[in-house]
Amino acid sequence: MASEVGRSKEVDTYIATQPPETQRALEELRSCIWRAAPGVSELMNYNIPAFALAQGGKRDKQIMIAGYPKHVGFYPHPDVIDAFADRLAGYKFAKGSVQFPLNKPIPKALVIEMVKLRLSQLQG
């Protein structure tokens, strides 16, 4: 992690309660988010891990992740999903979310690009 300061024990606990494959995928997403936005702070929102991209950022300034039995959910923002829709064609996605199946590698470079886009939207 880029900074231990923004880490959340609640997020650690959430990830630790997931099955091993889900834990692995969530940690990969978490690592990608930290790589793309080293200044994030973690929190729990809607009972799932959230990453505030701006100090005190509410839902529209957060990226969220969640674990499920067969996939992990990644919730960057509807604008980000729209911008990357062509590159998400191999995944199940909707207005503000994408599902990465546990039986396939997390597309780390894509996730990092998506986080960086959202960060630039908020700073712009």
Image: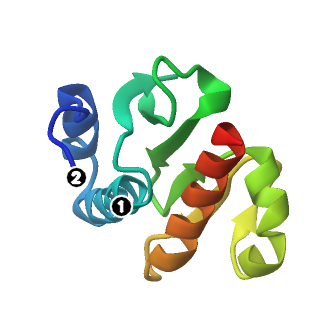
How far is mark 1 from mark 2, CA to CA? 7 Å
Q: Is residue 3 left or right of residue 109?
A: left
Q: Is residue 44 left or right of residue 24?
A: right
The residue lying at 47 percent from left, 82 percent from top is 104
Picture quadrant where residue 63 is located: top right
Q: Amino acid at mark 2?
A: Ala
Q: Is residue 111 above or below residue 62?
A: below
Q: Amino acid at mark 1?
A: Arg
Image spot of residue 13 (x, y percent): 20, 34
- Specify the label residue 2 is tagged with: 2
- Secondary-structure class at tag 1: helix
Image spot of residue 109 (x, y percent): 50, 78
**Mark 1 highlights which residue?**
35
The residue lying at 52 percent from left, 22 percent from top is 46
Q: Residue furthest front?
A: 124
Image spot of residue 31 (x, y percent): 31, 60
Which mark is first along the chain, 2 or 1? 2
Q: Nearer the viewer, residue 34 or 44?
A: 34
Pointers 1 and 2 in contact (C-beta within 8 Å) = yes
Looking at the image, can residue 44 be seen? Answer: yes
Q: Is residue 63 above or below residue 46?
A: below
